[in-house]
Amino acid sequence: MKEYSTRTLYNGVEIPGIGLGTYRMDDAAAARTVAEALAAGYRMIDTASMYGNEQGVGQGVSSSGIPREDVFLVSKVWNTDQGYQRTIGACEQSLKRLNTDYLDLYLIHWPKEQSFETWKAMEKLYRMGKLRAVGVSNFKIHHLQDLADRSDMLPMINQVELHPFYPQKRLRRFCEKLDVLVCSWAPLARGRITEIPQLNEIARSHGKTVSQIVLRWHCQLSAVPIPKTVHAERLRENLDIFDFSLSGEEMKIIASLKRDRIGPDPDLITF
């Protein structure tokens, strides 16, 4: 991988420019897919305690033969585990399931009333060396501002729903202002992009697939996409995005496809 193959967080930690998402994979699928992904060249694997597959992800990393220090491993604290002491315990359980002594990145999965106490626990785990980086997921501008106003340490990453139908321009600008890197979940809008005529036209002009065009769009936005697939061919295809560039006009066309989010609104979640 060439250009955009890594990003640097504000604490100096490097993060791969694309990763593998493992949402809705069971342990067996996660173990197999993670090993295949690492063999194909992926170096970032994203999971969460809520996914129920941390043990499988850990098995995939161990069986891959790739040294642990060469894999950027991400997990998240779930909503019911938020709060200071609960977060400390939840992180320890994730480390145990993943069979590792540390995480490269740990995220608050969704903003909740307890998120400030959760964040204080994550700051402690970071200072202890259990976490190389800490961040949040699904935080809107007002959630980030509230955390910034009350904390000494800003999140290093905000992982949010981001795709051509929901480009999150204001949030991305706010994160850039705070030096918070944006990571994109559902970067391919869960497959809903494939039938869009404009995307197919751009894909034909570059000799690429629609998915590759959209993943490249994320990279040129300085966002880190984490597409999910269990298919070996798609794993390789999703990595093959660093040998071409989209023009400014193509970037605008892709961003103009705005519709709406496909996931829940962080202000309205009840789980």
Image (cartoon, grey):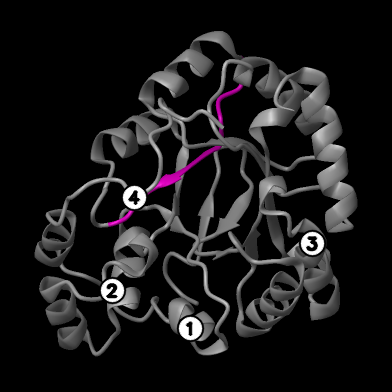
Task: State the SS at label 2.
Answer: helix
Task: State the SS at label 1.
Answer: helix
Q: Give the image location of residue 160, x and y in percent.
A: 44, 43
The kind of residue tagged 2 is Ile
User: Residue 97 in magenta?
Assistant: no
Looking at the rendered image, the quarter that the C terminus falls into is top right
- Quote the CA–CA distance across marks 2 and 1: 14 Å
Asked where in the image residue 16 lies, by quadrant, the reply is bottom right
115 shown above or below 164? above
The residue at which mark 1 appears reads as 234
Q: Which marked residue is nearer to the observer: mark 3 or mark 4?
A: 4
- Quote the CA–CA distance across marks 3 and 1: 25 Å
Q: Give the image location of residue 263, x and y in percent.
A: 39, 46
The residue at which mark 2 appears reads as 213
> Can residue 107 be seen at all in this image of the molecule?
yes
210 shown above or below 145? below
Asked where in the image residue 241 lies, by quadrant, the reply is bottom left
**Boundaries of the magenta span:** 152-163
